Each structure stands twice: as C-alpha cells, then as structure tokens.
Image (cartoon, rainbow, N blue to C red):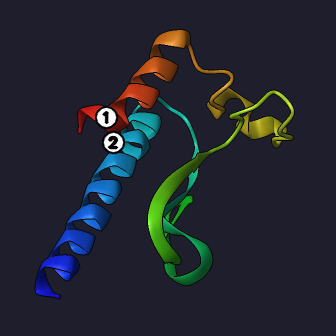
Amino acid sequence: MAMTIAIAIGLIFTIMLHEAGHLIAAKRGGMKATEFFVGFGPRLWSFRRGETEYGIKAIPAGGYVRVIGMTNLEEVEPEDEARTYRSAPYKRKMVMILAGVTV
C-alpha cells in the first residue's frame, strides 16, 4: 500500500514538473498562460496569481497549461493577440512544446 501511494505521488510530481516546463517557457516567450492545473475533471482547489490560475483537479491522471490562441479558431481579445501561441515565432513555439519533456 505504501509503495502504491509513493508511486502515485511520484507520478503526480512528475506531471507537475512536466507542465511547469511548458508554463515557464510560455511565460518567458511572452505568451499568456491563463491556467496551470494538475489533474482533470472537477476543480478541487485553485488560486490566481497574476493572470494565471493554478490548481488541482479531481482525477490525478495528467495536467495541462492553457495558453491563449493555441488554435486559429480560438477567439482572443484584440489586446492579447500579440501574446497568443499562434502569434509567437516558430522558435518560441518549439521551445514551449519541448520544455515539458526537457524538465
């Protein structure tokens, strides 16, 4: 039982580090990240710091960072258009994508 709990905690920590890599690269690249969550499903706990909401969701089977403008179809406020993923130079997009696996 203790081993199962240790593995679950280790997996959650690894997911958090992976997503933190994406978040840090996006913010340093000038993109607007609005959410950083570990888990999926209903929100259990969250807080906002600056323009980003950080939190934990009910099912600890993954995580995500939401960066505005990830698709061309997403509507974005005109003042945020320069900070979208789609507006970023190719190099910054690649750094953000690869940052998760390099952390």
The type of residue carrying mark 2 is: Gly
Please state which of the two labelled residues, at mark 1 or mark 2, is closer to the viewer: 1
**What is the C-alpha distance between the residues marked 1 and 2?**
8 Å
42 horizontally vs 90: left or right: right
Check the image and name the residue furthest to the top.
90
Within the image, what quadrant is residue 22 found in?
A: top left
The vertical placement of 44 against 52, above or below, is below
Judging by the rendered image, the residue that carries numbered circle 1 is 101
User: Which residue is located at x 39 percent, y 35 percent?
Assistant: 25
88 lies above or below 45: above
Which is nearer the N-term, disc 1 or disc 2?
2
Amino acid marked by disc 1: Val
Residue beneath the point at 34% across and 56% down: 15
Quarter holding the C terminus is: top left
Residue at the disc numbered 2:
21
Q: Residues within 10 Å of mark 2 (few under 14, many from 20)?
A: many
